[in-house]
Image (cartoon, rainbow, N blue to C red):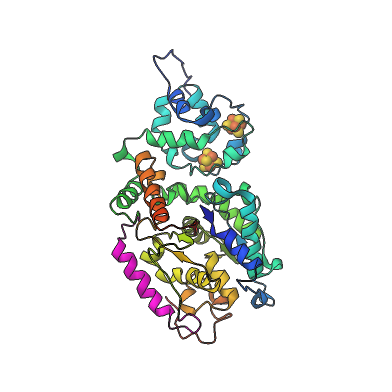
Amino acid sequence: MADEPLVLTKREGKSFKDIVMEKLPDGGNLNACLTCGTCAAGCPATGLAGMDPRKVVRMAALGMDEELKKTPWAWFCSMCTRCVHACPMNVNIPQLVYNMRASWPRDQRPRGILRSCDAALSTDTCSAMGAREEDFEFIVNDVLEGVREQPGFENIQAPIDKQGAYFFLNQNSREPVNEPEEMIPLWKIMHLVGADWTYGSKGWAAENYCMFLADDDAWKHITEVSIRKAEELGCKVFLNTE
Amino acid sequence: MQSIFTWYAKWIREGKLKVNSDWNKNLKIKFTVQDPCNIIRKSFGDACAQDLRFVVKSCVGEENFVDMAPNMSNNYCCGGGGGFLQSGYTEERLAYGQKKLDQIVATGADYCIAPCHNCHSQIHELAEHAPKHWGTVHLWTIICLSLGVLCRNERTYLHDDLKEVNIPEWDETEFLV
Ligand code: SF4
Ligand code: SF4
């Protein structure tokens, strides 16, 4: 791309940038870029696929919509927001990237992310590893039984759906599924401080791959299932454990 | 929605969580910590990053904590976020992570505490590409270690230097391999 002069032609209708700007508060300040390069200098994804955040903003400004919608760099930016934090004009690059991701046909987005999102949609636990309510309950109780053999932890609890508990805890699926013993230290801490807490049979999974997939409806659904469960149980604090 | 880091800090300040760094007084094992983007920069900011550091220092000893540069809200993403871990773009993910790798190497730390599961997976993998393979641990592991309640079967991510340190006297569990 770099060697060919870029010929700008008048376009009919809205550009990709215009459409994205309509969705964002203050248009994501996408017209405010000073081309200072602060974003690119501090972005770990700079240079991957020949791209960087400033370039992305320039391409949007120049209406290079096809290139923007095609570049795999949309998946190399982790949407970490460090660039926005550093940008003098508060240009919302990660939201631009989110919309670049969303412009990919759903079935052509990276398979791993797609599968994780679909797995989460397949069960109300929202687990990206597809762990079901009964799986979670079994694992938690099985691990708990072992911990109760330890002196001082005979009464340790790891409740699921405890009505009126103060804290609603979430848990990354990889713990119950791959390394259940990693849940024990967390439970021990909660026990020692005397915290009143619960998991939810629905929405306990902490990860949300649908957000990374840039599937709006799906990620909202995942978030809502968790929050609804926490509300239903009357929990006061939704406590993010990671 | 709140972060558990803030609660850990509160419980330590209130004396409910009796962590103690004496186990590391002579060992002097060095720790650094990752600031998960989703929790620090994107949600709770530097106040939460300070709480996180307070918790870590209370557990490992102030003199055994080495911060990354840059840090807190300015810290770099590890490269595991945004779906990167599941995206299949492994080479790019590791290239992205080079910044984090260099940062951790520069601290000289023996362990990096990664209090988010995505960060944990990514930083654990990055260690394999570093000259010195640091250990990558969850925060709750270090809290329970310093409380003296961390059993052998809960030490998967600790290296040999910490496999037998501050074991509860009643522990009859075995190391997981
Ligand atoms: S830091 Fe902001 S103003 Fe500077 S080049 Fe990047 S987007 Fe533009
Ligand atoms: S949000 Fe994307 S572009 Fe911005 S610093 Fe992070 S990886 Fe780079």
User: Horizontal and vertical percent for residue B53?
Assistant: 64, 60
How many callouts does the rendering have?
Answer: 0
Q: Which of A56 and A171 is in front in this view?
A: A171
User: Horizontal and vertical percent for residue A199?
Assistant: 41, 62
Residue stretch in magenta: A127-154
Q: Quadrant of ligand 1?
A: top right
Q: Which image quadrant for residue B6?
A: bottom right
**Is residue B91 in the magenta section?**
no
- The quarter of the picture where the N terminus of chain A appears is top left
Q: Is residue A15 above or below residue A222?
A: above
Q: Can residue A46 be seen in this view?
A: no
Residue at left offset 46%, top offset 38%? A49
Q: Is residue B163 visible?
A: yes
**Is residue A149 in the magenta section?**
yes
Q: In this view, does B19 lie above or below B3?
A: below
- Residue farthest right in this picture: B63
Q: In this view, does B53 lie above or below A185?
A: above
Q: Nearer the viewer, residue A174 or A34?
A: A174
User: Horizontal and vertical percent for residue A137?
Assistant: 33, 67
Q: In this view, does B104 lie to the left or right of A62?
A: right
User: Horizontal and vertical percent for residue B56?
Assistant: 62, 64
Residue at left offset 38%, top offset 78%? A145
Q: Is residue A174 left or right of residue B47?
A: left
- Residue farthest top in this picture: A10
